[in-house]
Amino acid sequence: MPLTYRIRHYDTIGSTNDEAKRLASLGEPEGTVVSADEQTAGRGRSGRTWITPPGAAIAMSIILRPRIPAIHSTQIALLGGLAVLEGIRRIVDLPAQIKWPNDVLVRGKKVAGVLAEATFAGEALESVVLGMGVNVNAGPPPDFKLEYAATSLAAESGCPLDREAVMNAILAALDARYPQLGRPELAAAWSEHLAMRGEQVRVAGMTETIIGRLEGVTGEGAIVIRLESGEARMLLAGDVHLRGA
Ligand code: BTN
């Protein structure tokens, strides 16, 4: 089923994810997009703050109601990262990559992040709010303490870009990929665009850290790490952090 988008745009909002979650809980249909020129309480993964430079970035959250088993809900965040990457590439020729699970990098620096938040009704997946933050014409201010190097599409391409065009391209890419949830095409696309693919990486989890060669992504959205022993380990996103070894 194609997504029918309905945009609710705000000049300023706390967090587009929070507003989309509120609307989803009131029964707002799939395809509603909450977007804003500025967020005053933008949220990133793992409780981090996300800065949306006013008028220079994309902050949007899409309400999805995928008919997939709840166990597959982690794929939505990866789908979001892929849609951002493919949307960017429709507009500007940049070497964008996905840092698993769902950061988008250009030349090793982060240009976009994805925050997917699922709601369950008992065992069933009820809705997912897919939040995307893209540094289009500016990144976070230099004095903002980051755990990673950040950049913007404009800085990397050398020219300012039309935010709305980038946003529409991302939404079109999401629409094209959405029916592929749970299908092998997604695994192939994730693997193709994967940053550090073929390299030695370190994956730190809650209980152990493993080091091995990053081989690709499965259809479930797990990364495949080949250990020195030859054993392949698959890890799903969650409390694991991927770094170069
Ligand atoms: C991350 O990389 O940590 C994820 C960042 C996600 C930021 C986006 S901006 C739009 C939406 N609203 C939020 O509060 N967060 C997401």
Image (tube, rainbow, N blue to C red):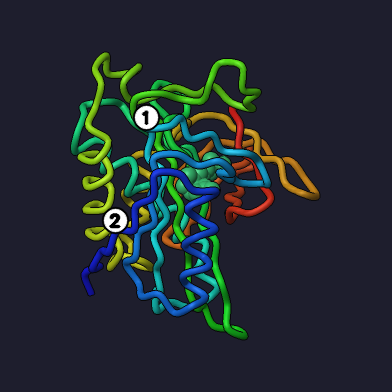
Q: Mark 2 = which residue?
A: 174
How packed mark 1 is, by other alpha carbons closer than 10 Å (few <14, some 14-19, many 20 or more), is many
The amino acid type of the residue labelled 1 equals Ala
Q: Residues within 10 Å of mark 2 (few under 14, many from 20)?
A: many
Q: Reading the chain from its start, which is encountered first: label 1 or label 2?
A: 1
Left/right placement of residue 61 relative to residue 209 reads: left
- The residue located at (33%, 40%) in the rendering is 85
- Residue 13 drawn above or below residue 6: above
Q: Nearer the viewer, residue 154 or 240?
A: 154
Are the two marked residues, 1 and 2, in contact with CB atoms closer than 8 angstroms? no
Query: What residue is shown at x 39% (from left), y 50% (from top)?
Result: 10
Measured along the vertical axis of the image, is residue 136 above or below residue 26? Answer: above
- Foreground: 205 or 7? 7
Single out the mark in the foreground, 1 or 2.
1
Taking the image as shown, residue 7 lies to the left or right of residue 16, namely: left
**In this view of the protein, can residue 233 be seen by the observer?**
yes
Residue under label 1, please give it: 56
x%, y% of residue 209?
74, 41
Across and down, in percent, residue 211 comes to 66, 36
- Residue at 59%, 44% (x, y): give it: 41
Where's residue 194, x and y in %? 41, 38
Q: Secondary structure at mark 2?
A: helix
Q: Amino acid at mark 2?
A: Leu
Q: Is residue 154 above or below residue 29?
A: above
Taking the view exactly as shown, the residue that stands out farthest to the front is 11
Residue 128 percent coordinates (x, y): 48, 67
* Disc 2 within 8 angstroms of ligand 1 (CB): no
